[in-house]
Each structure stands twice: as C-alpha cells, then as structure tokens.
Image (cartoon, rainbow, N blue to C red):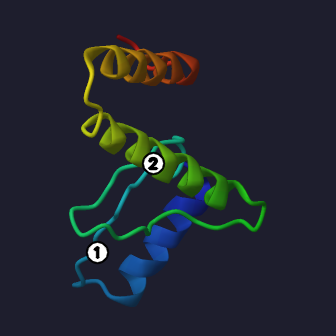
Amino acid sequence: MCILYLAAFDELKEANPSGRFWLKLDATDINKALTESMKGVWNGDVDLGDGKLQELREEYDNRVHQVGSLAGLESCVELEAGWKQWIDELDVDGVPR
C-alpha cells in the first residue's frame, strides 16, 4: 500500500479515534464492460469528454437491439444468419465461447 494512503488513514484515525470508516474498493471502471441495470438506468461510467462513453452507449444499444430483433425473425434461415452475425461480433470482441 502506498505511503500516501497510510498517512491519510493515520490522519483519519487521529481526527476521530473512535470513528468507523468504510473503504469502498471498486475496480469496475478499469475494465471496459457494460452491465444493464434492471431499471434501465445508465450510470457509473465517467464521461471524460473524449466521446468514448457515447461510443460505448451506442454500441451497447445496437447490441441490445440486435439481440431483440432475433426474436422477430420468422424463418430458420434468417434466424441462423442473425445468430452467425451476432457470434461473429462476439468473436471480434474477444468473448470466449
């Protein structure tokens, strides 16, 4: 652990010796991944102003739409082509099978 962090913890302890402190460790922002909330709320990702957040959102929305559109296909040929396209895109993303 970095000495700077230890110094900060020492100051907290000195300021409030009987206090309780919670540390929240969250490394999800390090990984490029998306998770859909049950309420459909999009939050938790920092917008750095470089357009990446909007790009990820558009890619995510397109994927959700693509998967949803598979349900509307009527023929086995269309369904097979849709699944193959979806699997190819997952391969491009590096998702293991």
The residue to which callout 2 is attached is 27
Above/below status of 68 relative to 53: above
The residue to which callout 1 is attached is 21
Residue at screen point 36% across, 21% down: 78
Q: Quadrant of residue 22?
A: bottom left
Query: Is 57 or 8 nearer to us in this picture?
Result: 57
Q: Is residue 34 left or right of residue 93?
A: left
Alpha-carbon span between mark 1 and mark 2? 19 Å
Q: Position of residue 90 (x, y in %)?
A: 47, 22
* Residues packed near mark 1 inside 10 Å, few (<14), some (14 to 19) or many (20 plus): few
Above/below status of 11 relative to 80: below
Above/below status of 79 relative to 24: above
Residue type marked 2:
Ala
Q: Quadrant of residue 10?
A: bottom left
Q: Position of residue 73 (x, y in %)?
A: 30, 32
* Residues packed near mark 2 inside 10 Å, few (<14), some (14 to 19) or many (20 plus): few
Residue at screen point 34% across, 64% down: 23
Query: Is 66 or 54 nearer to us in this picture?
Result: 66
Q: Is residue 93 left or right of residue 20?
A: right
Secondary structure beneath dot 2 equals loop
Q: Which mark is residue 78?
A: none
Q: Residue furthest front?
A: 75
Residue at screen point 31% across, 22% down: 79
N-terminal-most mark, 1 or 2: 1
